[in-house]
Amino acid sequence: MTTLKLIVLAGLPGSGKSTLAEGLSRHFSLPLLSVDPIEAAMWRGGLLRDQTGIAAYEVAQALAAEQLRLNHSVLIDAVNPVEAPRAAWRKLAAKYRADLKIIECICVDPAIHRRRIDARIRNIDGMAEIDWARVEQRRAEYEAWTNARLTLDTSAEPPERLLAEAIRYLA
C-alpha cells in the first residue's frame, strides 16, 4: 500500500467491522482509530453520555487528520450511520489528497447477528455491551450509503476470507 489512504470501516454494531479493522491494521501495520473506545474514554473523563456521540467522531477525525498530515494511512472503525460523519471523512480525505476507501460490513442473517450481539464481550472500560433492541433501533436510523464501497456480508464467509477480500480491495 503506497498511496495515502483513509480507510473507513462502517456498519451496525456486531456486523464484524471491528474484527475486520483489527485484521487490516495488523496486515498493513496501520493505526486504527475506533470511535467506541474514544467515547468510553470521554465518559471516564467525566463527560455526560449525551454529549459524546458527535464529539467522539470529532476526536477520531482530528486524530486521523494528524496521521494523514504525517503522510500515514489510517483505519477508522465506526458505525457511521448517517451522512454527517460520512461527509466529514470525504472532506478529510480530500484535504490530504488521500484515497478514501470505504468498507461496509453487513450481517444479512439476523439470527447470526443477534447471536454475535448476545455473546459479545469487547472489554471497553466504561462501555456496556449493546443489546439487540438497541441494534434494531440503530438499524432503523442507519441511512443507506451512496459512496462507492466494498460491502461484505460477514454472515456469509469466514473472517479470514473476508479479510483477504478487503486486502485485495485496498491493495
Image (tube, grey):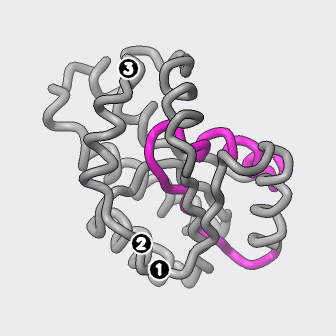
Marks 2 and 3, how far apart at CA: 27 Å
Amino acid under disc 2: Trp
Residue at label 2? 145
Which residue is pictured at 77% across the width and 53% down the height?
162
Mark 3: which secondary structure? loop
Q: Which residue is mark 3?
A: 127
- Above-or-below relation of 16 to 141: above
Q: Which residue is found at the position 15% from the left and 37% from the top?
A: 51
Front residue (pair 47, 154): 154
> What range is drawn magenta here?
2-29
Badge 3: how crowded within 10 Å, few (<14), some, or many (20+)?
some
Q: Quickly name the residue at label 1.
A: 147
Mark 1 or 3, which is nearer the eye?
A: 1
Residue 54 placement (x, y as % from top left): 24, 49
Please state which amino acid type lies under the numbered disc 3: Met
Instruction: Name the residue located 57 percent from the left edge and 68 percent from the top edge.
Output: 102
Q: Secondary structure at mark 2?
A: loop
Q: Residues within 10 Å of mark 1 (few under 14, many from 20)?
A: few
